[in-house]
Amino acid sequence: MEAIFAGSLDVTYVGPGPTLNAHLKSNGEEMRVISGAANGGVALVVRADSAIKTPADFRGKKIATPQLGNTQDISCRAWLKAQGFKVTLTGGDVMVIPTANPDQLGLLQRGAVEGVWTVEPWVTRLERDARARVFLEDKETITTWLVSSVKFLRTHHEWAKKIAEANAELTRWIQQNEAEAQRLLIQELKAETRTDFAPEAVARAWKRIQLTSEISRDLIAKSVRDASEAGFLKGSTDTSRLIEIP
């Protein structure tokens, strides 16, 4: 988002949390969602031997999320507040600790956190390697959008159109070629994280994710509510100009 504001980035895949924050901070003058990408694939997991059985059991506990203000971090904080907990950016009844996805495994294994709210393929990795169990699966959530700067849309509209069309074409290809897409994903994850992901684990994670180029206004409204509840959005929540399909 900072790169788009600075003019050094034109188009990006990103979650709704940062997008909405940037869009509303600019009074709707910046950030446009030009295509959907992925929904779901998000869960709150706890250790298999955890005594946590109900939401109330999280009082006084620590939960890891991928990054402060990212989509899963916002969803986690909003959910905790909906359960009646007081949650601040640095404390409260439940402590939410932003932690890079690859580091969450060690924290959960050591008992340094009681739960992790994250996204696939990390959910499945925690299930397999930390013997975690899913406490809550967040299916009704936007995971990733394809977002463009307003300047790029105005000055290179045809390019933006081709990128959005390519995203839709890629989405269809992935849906029709799951085995090959998963093989490519494993290669990319290994290059990015230096960690091996078992093919059966990726196949398992795949089932939780909905790849789509569609944009759900209902889920946008939910994302706005969550970000407001979590304290990341102040003032206007007008998203009438957020979507612009080139």
Image (tube, helix red, strand yellow):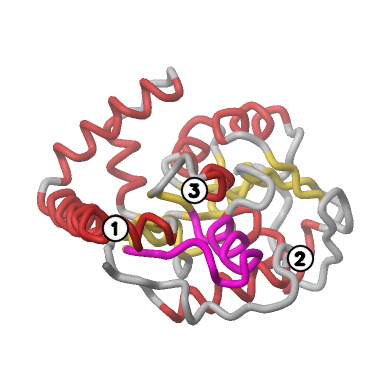
Q: What residue sits 14% from the left and 55% below the top?
A: 169
Q: Nearer the viewer, residue 186 or 168?
A: 168
Q: Which residue is mark 1?
A: 211
Cα distance in 3D space between marks 2 and 1:
29 Å
**Kind of residue at disc 3:** Val
Q: What residue sits 18% from the left and 52% below the top?
A: 166
Picture coordinates of residue 153, whole percent (x, y): 34, 61
Residue 187 visible in rendering: yes
Q: Which residue is mark 3?
A: 119
Q: Nearer the viewer, residue 139 or 229?
A: 229
Picture coordinates of residue 99, whole percent (x, y): 66, 36
Residue at the far top: name it: 194
Q: For the image shown, how many numbered marks are present on the structure?
A: 3
Q: What residue sits 39% from the left and 61% below the top?
A: 39
**Kind of residue at disc 2:** Gly
Dot 3 or dot 2: first in sequence order is 3
Q: Which residues are magenta?
A: 15-34
Q: Which residue is mark 2?
A: 231
**SS of the residue at dot 3?**
strand
Q: What residue sits 76% from the left and 65% below the top?
A: 231
On screen, residue 224 above or below 34: below
Residue at the far front: name it: 155
Dot 2 or dot 1: first in sequence order is 1
